[in-house]
Image (tube, rainbow, N blue to C red):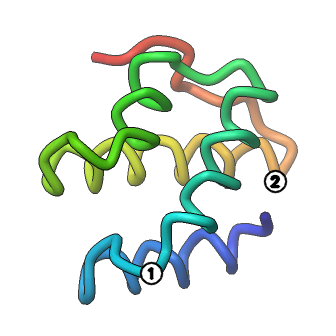
Amino acid sequence: MSSTDLAELGWDLASDGFAGRETAVREVVRTARANGLSPVLTGILGDPQQPTVARLRAYGRIAAALGAIDAGRPAAVAHAA
């Protein structure tokens, strides 16, 4: 996913929630795991049973890291804080 795709999905999630977007979220989780991002954050994002606010925060951290990777910078989220 490009930084633009991640930003658009982020806006959609923030305004309308996760319903109907789980396929896109799973793609983000797969990409994040493939890039070695935090298993805690990817676990939270990928689990529909987690509170929405926790999933949104995890998405934000993951999207920022993937955006950095897309821009050729190192990802700063190897571990959850």
**Where, quadrant-wise, is the N terminus in this rendering?**
bottom right
Amino acid type for the residue under numbered disc 1: Gly
Under mark 2, the amino acid is: Ala
Measured along the vertical axis of the image, is residue 65 above or below residue 63?
above
Q: Is residue 60 left or right of residue 54?
A: right
In the picture, the disc for residue 71 is 2
Q: Please name the residue shown 68% across and 77% down the image.
A: 5
Q: Residue at x 13, y 47 (%)?
A: 51
Point 34% across, 71% down: residue: 18
Circle 1 sits on which residue? 20
Q: Is residue 13 left or right of residue 78?
A: left
Q: Residues within 10 Å of mark 2 (few under 14, many from 20)?
A: few
- Residue 43: where, in percent of width, then height? 43, 27
Disc 2/disc 1 C-alpha distance (Å) = 28 Å
| For residue 41, side relative to residue 62 (left or right) | left
Residue positioned most to the top: 79
Given residues 45 and 2, the one toward you in this image is 45
Camera-side residue of 36 and 19: 19
Q: Secondary structure at mark 2?
A: loop
Secondary structure at badge 1 equals loop
